[in-house]
């Protein structure tokens, strides 16, 4: 199977727009699971298959990015879909940003009652930054929602995108009677007491007059679908449906198979590395510790950029400088895993390791390139870690190292004082930290306020750095790589130091 048959994509949405349910239904369509754990279903002990960590199961939100691979026949070809599940909570922007570096396209899920919400817009901007093309899915049309044209115009205006509707809902909410597919002219109909879609399509459907007129207007009044404009990120095809009731899901998968780009070149400094390059190359966009509570394992997720990977092959991580043999590469379906004998450009493979691989590492056969665009971001919340049992200092250090390697938190070691400082982008990450310290490492710790509001990485000539250190030791720390970090009490502090130390740079991001 070649790389042109790969579709590596993510689903982006605001919390509660239905992303996890859609993920489930896509996997069902691909035959990857037999029972979708309908999210938050009353009286159901089951939780959605793609939300697996304890805190996710308690809260019903996706916190970690999972990878799920499934296959489906399309036009006589077997297409391999690699679906990356992005954290559905606004705090996890860093993890989400990294996940979006590993995909070639995205599905944007919008709640028909709410339209474009803040988190959707943020995630869309990340996609735009990386020229990731978007297919839009307006979800929950079986519930009361906003008028179709209002939604289409909002997407076009707020995101500065051409919209090209591919379907039209026949009524909404209590009046919902199905979905008209413009490509086939058929109407997918609800069946039975649950009003789900079970495959019944009317070929010569009589539509209510108003629906027929509006559907025609939607086709004429908006741009026709243009593949090049979509792949350039200038146009989004819009599908309507209900993930919960299976409407629009099959059409969505077909759209990804048909329109979404196969693996794209990836930036390595000034160079673009094409998927056709013979050398096996890839980058680590995520590290996940303790995926299996029975084994203290750690898995690095690699997006393969080029070449044909074979099990047992030696690759050199940029952070290590010496080759490692990859004996047990893993392909994922949610919690189920299988060993991969081969992998192609576009695939996501898991590499078990004991701390040798980190987010942002490039892996390659020749060790001559570095993929760029996976930075650490300056934290917006900084807290001191207060250990409840002082005998567990060593376990705490190990846990913080693991979790910072995953990118869940950043750890800073102050030049004066013994307490570790953790930095995060959002409040929920702190709750995740405390919960995981307790559940996975059996370390009870509290977090207390620190005097610092943000951090900046400091670079410059050795003499200027030394002078800066001598005068500011109380506000300096090292990150886990040993790089110098200025801990600032306010943005004013950063500006003041930058003005008074013109030879130094104070950076809000750091590339690996």
Image: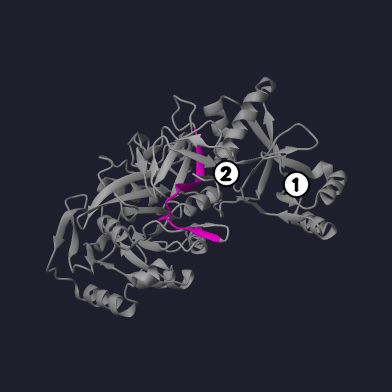
**Against 119, is 473 above or below?**
above
Q: Position of residue 496 (x, y in %)?
A: 82, 58
Residue plotted at (37% across, 71% down): 228
- In this rendering, is residue 439 above or below 380? above
Depth order, front residue of 18/488? 488
Q: Main secondary structure of the magenta part?
A: strand
Q: Nearer the viewer, residue 201 or 368?
A: 368
What percent of the width, then of the height, locates residue 40?
37, 42
Is residue 152 among the parts visible in the rendering?
no
Count every numbered label the image shows and give the total. Answer: 2
Residue 243, label in figure? none
Give whichever of 22, 99 is nearer the camera.
99
- Of discs 1 and 2, which sits in the foreground? 2
Q: CA distance from mark 1 to mark 2?
A: 28 Å
Going from the N terminus, do you reach mark 1 or mark 2 first?
Answer: 2
**Tag 2's secondary structure?**
loop
Q: Count neighbours of disc 1 (C-alpha within 10 A) and say few if under 14, some if 14 to 19, many if 20 or more.
A: many
Check if mark 1's residue and mark 2's residue have beta carbons within 8 Å. Answer: no
Q: Which residue shows up at 55% across the image and 39% down it?
A: 406
Image mark for residue 318: 2
Q: Quadrant of residue 204?
A: bottom left
In depth, the one of 102 and 22 nearer the eye is 102
Taking the image as shown, residue 151 lies to the left or right of residue 322, namely left
- Per the rendering, the mark at residue 487 is 1
Q: Which residues are magenta?
A: 271-289
- Asked whether, in this view, residue 41 is left or right of residue 412, the answer is left
């Amino acid at each position: 199977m070649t790389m042109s048959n790969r579709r590596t994509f993510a689903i982006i949405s605001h919390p509660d727009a239905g992303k996890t349910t859609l993920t489930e239904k896509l996997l069902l369509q691909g035959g990857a699971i037999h029972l979708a754990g309908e999210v938050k279903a009353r009286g159901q002990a089951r939780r959605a298959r793609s939300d697996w960590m304890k805190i996710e199961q308690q809260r019903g939100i996706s916190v970690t990015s999972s990878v799920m691979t499934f296959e489906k026949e399309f036009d006589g070809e077997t297409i391999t879909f690699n679906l990356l599940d992005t954290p559905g909570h606004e705090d996890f922007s860093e993890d989400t940003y990294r996940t979006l570096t590993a995909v070639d396209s995205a599905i944007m899920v919008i709640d028909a009652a709410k339209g474009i919400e803040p988190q959707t817009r943020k995630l869309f901007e990340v996609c735009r930054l990386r020229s990731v093309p978007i297919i839009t899915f307006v979800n929950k049309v079986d519930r009361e929602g906003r008028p179709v044209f209002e939604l289409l115009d909002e997407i076009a205006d707020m995101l500065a995108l051409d919209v090209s509707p591919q379907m039209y809902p026949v009524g909404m909410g209590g009046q919902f009677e199905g979905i008209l597919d413009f490509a086939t002219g058929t109407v997918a109909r609800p069946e039975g007491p649950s009003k789900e879609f079970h495959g019944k399509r009317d070929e010569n459907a009589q539509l209510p007059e108003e629906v027929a007129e509006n559907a025609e207007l939607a086709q004429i009044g908006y741009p026709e679908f243009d593949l090049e404009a979509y792949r350039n990120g200038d146009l989004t095809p819009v599908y309507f449906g209900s993930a919960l009731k299976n409407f629009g899901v099959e059409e969505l998968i077909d759209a990804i198979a048909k329109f979404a780009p196969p693996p794209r070149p990836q930036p390595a400094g000034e160079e673009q590395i094409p998927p056709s390059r013979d050398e096996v190359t890839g980058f680590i966009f995520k590290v996940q510790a303790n995926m299996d509570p029975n084994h203290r394992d750690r898995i690095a997720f690699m997006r393969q950029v080029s070449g044909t990977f074979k099990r047992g092959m030696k690759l050199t991580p940029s952070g290590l400088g010496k080759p490692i043999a990859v004996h047990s590469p893993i392909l994922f379906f949610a919690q189920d895993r299988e060993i991969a004998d081969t992998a192609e450009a576009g695939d996501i493979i898991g590499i078990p390791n004991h701390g040798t691989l980190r987010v942002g590492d490039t892996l390659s056969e020749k060790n001559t390139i570095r993929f760029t665009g996976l930075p650490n971001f300056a934290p917006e919340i900084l807290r001191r870690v207060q250990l409840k049992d002082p005998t567990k200092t060593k376990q705490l250090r190990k846990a913080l190292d693991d979790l910072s390697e995953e990118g869940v938190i950043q750890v800073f070691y102050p030049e004066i004082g013994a307490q570790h400082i953790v930095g995060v982008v959002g409040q929920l990450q702190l709750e995740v930290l405390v919960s995981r310290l307790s559940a996975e490492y059996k370390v009870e710790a509290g977090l207390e306020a620190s005097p610092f509001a943000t951090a900046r990485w400091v670079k410059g000539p050795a003499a200027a750095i030394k002078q800066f250190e001598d005068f500011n030791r109380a506000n300096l720390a090292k990150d886990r790589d040993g790089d110098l970090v200025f801990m600032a009490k306010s943005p004013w502090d950063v500006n003041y130091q930058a003005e008074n130390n013109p030879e130094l740079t104070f950076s809000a991001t750091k590339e690996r």
